[in-house]
Image: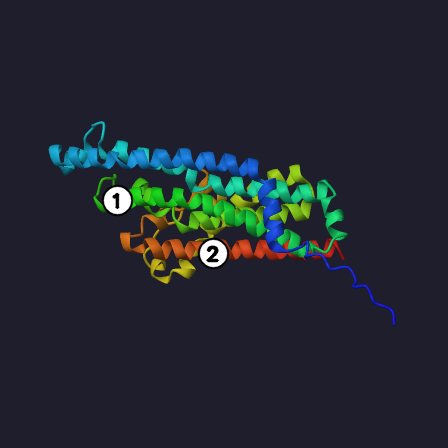
């Protein structure tokens, strides 16, 4: 009788999502570190400006509400609203464009560097490789953006509740625009980067095309007023339409917006508007990711 030698032990699955996530984080340590520095700097700025609302309240108590809103003082409603709008400008849509550019660059580089050829020789399926990368990238960018959204909205809601902002379009933009939909736009940017990088198979072309696609989709959502179809009570409240197609769009920094819709909102509409807008944005992101996977499957067939 001959003794049988045990066969070689199978190595752990090289394609586990945890290992892929760790690999991606190592590859992204430089852009993530820069993003984190930006988040920390903006967070300090938002926290510091929040303390200024106490000065606004003191001024209003001293000169009266009418003079506070229509006079000219250092801490009056006009200056405080302008400062709040300025605080929101780098947050309202730029993270989505940055996310799109980064996702497009990373996805296109997988084709440029021929790394996908190496992946095909391993036990990692291309679908898992890409979906894990996109999911980890989107999750990290959203996680880093959450503190900014929370700090800004805490400041904006505080000012809105105490009636410290000018009445009109600026107040509505400052209060209603930033929130969960800001995070949804980041995911849309990642999905747009995934789509353009997979379709164009070029890191530099995707670096340009992804932010452009993200902006065009946001403009389409705003201009079509699709949010009114989701949030039915808004439909009867909105009157008027800006002329000129896409040219007639208004903007809060780089974000297309519709002041007729915003001016129709009341304080209690914040979460309904944000959730309805987020659902539409995430639905577009899901369609882009689905299209990316279909292109990937066709290219690797």
The N terminus sits in image quarter: bottom right
Residue 272 can be seen in this image: yes
| Location of the C terminus (image quadrant) | bottom right
Label of residue 158 in the image:
1
Of 273 and 190, nearer the camera is: 190
**Mark 1 to mark 2 CA distance (whole Å):** 27 Å
The total of numbered circles placed on residues is 2
Residue 133 in percent (x, y) is at 60, 49
Identify the residue at horizontal 59%, vertical 41% (top origin): 26
Mark with earlier residue (1, 2): 1
Q: Can residue 252 be seen in this view?
A: no
Residue in the picture at 38% in, 53% down: 274
Direction bottom: furthest residue: 1
- Mark 1 element type: helix
User: Is 1 drawn above or below residue 173 in the view shown?
Assistant: below
Percent of width and height locating residue 99: 53, 42
User: Please, what secondary structure does the residue beneath circle 2 have?
Assistant: helix
Between circles 1 and 2, the one closer to the viewer is 1
The residue carrying mark 2 is 280
- Left or right position of 178 against 212: left
Residue at 15% over, 37% down? 66
Viewer-side residue, 147 vs 193: 147
Residue 138 screen position, x and y as percent = 53, 48
Residue 130, percent from left and from top: 64, 51
* Position above or below: 237 against 147: below
Left or right of 66 in this view: 168: right
Left or right of residue 265: residue 132: right
Around disc 2, counting alpha carbons within 10 Å, would you say few (fewer than 14), some (14 to 19), or many (20 or more)?
Answer: some
| Residue 297 in which image quadrant | bottom right
């Amino acid at each position: 009788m001959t003794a049988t030698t045990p066969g070689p032990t199978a190595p752990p699955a090289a394609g586990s999502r945890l290992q892929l996530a760790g690999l991606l984080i190592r590859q992204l340590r430089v852009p993530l570190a820069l993003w984190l520095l930006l988040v920390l700097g903006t967070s300090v700025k938002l926290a510091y400006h929040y303390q200024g609302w106490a000065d606004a309240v003191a001024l209003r108590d001293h000169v009266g509400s009418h003079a506070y809103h229509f006079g000219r003082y250092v801490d009056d409603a006009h200056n405080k609203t302008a400062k709040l709008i300025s605080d929101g400008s780098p947050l309202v849509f730029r993270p989505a464009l940055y996310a799109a550019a980064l996702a497009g660059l990373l996805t296109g580089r997988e084709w440029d560097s021929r790394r996908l050829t190496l992946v095909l020789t391993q036990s990692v399926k291309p679908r898992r490789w890409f979906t894990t990368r996109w999911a980890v990238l989107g999750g990290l960018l959203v996680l880093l953006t959450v503190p900014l959204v929370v700090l800004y909205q805490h400041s904006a809601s505080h000012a809105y509740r105490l009636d410290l902002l000018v009445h009109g379009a600026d107040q509505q933009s400052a209060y209603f625009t930033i929130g969960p939909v800001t995070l949804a736009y980041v995911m849309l940017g990642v999905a747009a980067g995934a789509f353009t990088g997979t379709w164009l198979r070029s890191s530099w072309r995707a670096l340009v095309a992804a932010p452009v696609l993200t902006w065009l989709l946001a403009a389409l959502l705003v201009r079509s007023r699709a949010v009114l179809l989701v949030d039915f009570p808004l439909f009867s409240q909105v009157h008027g339409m800006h002329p000129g197609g896409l040219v007639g769009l208004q903007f809060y920094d780089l974000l297309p917006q519709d002041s007729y819709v915003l001016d129709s909102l009341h304080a209690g509409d914040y979460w309904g508007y944000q959730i309805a807008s987020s659902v539409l944005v995430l639905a577009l992101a899901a369609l882009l990711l689905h299209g990316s996977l279909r292109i990937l499957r066709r290219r690797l067939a």
